[in-house]
Amino acid sequence: MADKPVIKIGHLKITDHLILGVTDLKQKKGMETFNYCSLKTVVKNGWNEVADALAVKEIDAAFILAPTAMDLYKSGVALKLILFTHKSGSILVKSKKANIKTIEDFSGKVVLIPYQLSVHNMLFHKLLAEKGLKPGTGKDKGVDVFLEVVAPFQMPEAIQYDEEGEIAGFIVAEPYGSQAIANGYGEEFYLSKDLWPNHPCCVFVVRDDVLKKHGDAIQEITNSLVRSGISIEAQPGPAAAIGASFLGQEKSVIENILADPRKRITTSELFPVIEDLETIQNYMHKNMGIMKTKIDMEKFVDTSFAKNAGAK
């Protein structure tokens, strides 16, 4: 079929999006054939770029932060959440120069987050709130820890060149935390899975018009993504080699993440759990005040594709 539609999927170079890299490679190598579409991965540098590309219909679908997807939906972008892309997989890294031993030591310093509307921001907020500390920006009153939004790929360099140790650290999707650790500038402070076991973070969303017109194609892609997730956990070695190329990273860094016996990231359970998404929405609404109004999760999430794909 020469006239197969090209489905463009936006993503970042993070381990959370590795299932897309595996599916992409399977297509290119002819290990899997899509009957209803061809796939084009569109790499972006930061979360605002992914969100904007979806809003202006530059891409058909995206791997995107769950809270950002909720916000897009709320602002009128017609899309559906159809799959989790992973569970867990992020890390809170402390800078070696900042002399951080306890959570209280973050006080008075800067911590980098990838986006306001991120599970990273929520998890760090929760961690600080439990110790009575208030995160915020320089504009907010009575702030203990100052948050700055920085694109994930820029975070390792930010602490590397911070001579004064003003940046206490960052919370981000892998492999950027492990990269900073491997380069000797950072140390692991917490894995995100220890702050909220099996938490969602990035999700696969598709525009409504694309779902309507190319439902078979999206089902095909979803089936492949679910298979890719299972294969990553079954074969971390080959998956790390694919990850190194797809994410532009050292193979050893990806290998350490995937082969860690602590199961830092889960890619075999991608079924969208509505209760977990509600937990994020409720916390960001009630405790953080970032989400002013809430969305109807039942209308936003379409589990039919995940069901048909046999996602767990």
Image (tube, rainbow, N blue to C red):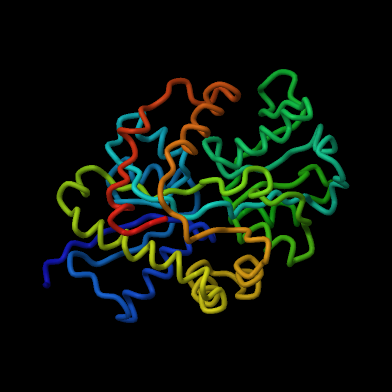
Q: Quadrant of the C terminus?
A: bottom left
Q: Residue at x 43, y 50 (%)?
A: 84
As rendered, which of 293 and 229 lies closer to the eye? 229
As rendered, which of 237 and 74 lies closer to the eye? 237
Q: Position of residue 131 (x, y in %)?
A: 79, 29
Q: Position of residue 203 (x, y in %)?
A: 43, 48
> Would residue 12 appear left or right of 94 to someone viewing this image?
left
Where 277 sits versus 260, above or below? above
Residue sitting farthest toward the top: 141
Where 140 sits versus 171, above or below? above
Q: Is residue 84 visible?
A: yes
Q: Residue at x 69, y 51 (%)?
A: 191
Q: Position of residue 172 (x, y in %)?
A: 62, 50
Q: Position of residue 19 (x, y in %)?
A: 44, 64
Q: Is residue 59 visible?
A: no
State the image quarter where residue 228 is shown. bottom left
Q: Residue at x 33, y 66 (%)?
A: 224
State the image quarter where residue 125 is shown. top right
Q: Residue at x 30, y 80 (%)?
A: 30
As rendered, which of 307 and 227 lies closer to the eye? 307
> Would residue 78 appear left or right of 239 to someone viewing this image?
left
Numbered marks: total: 0
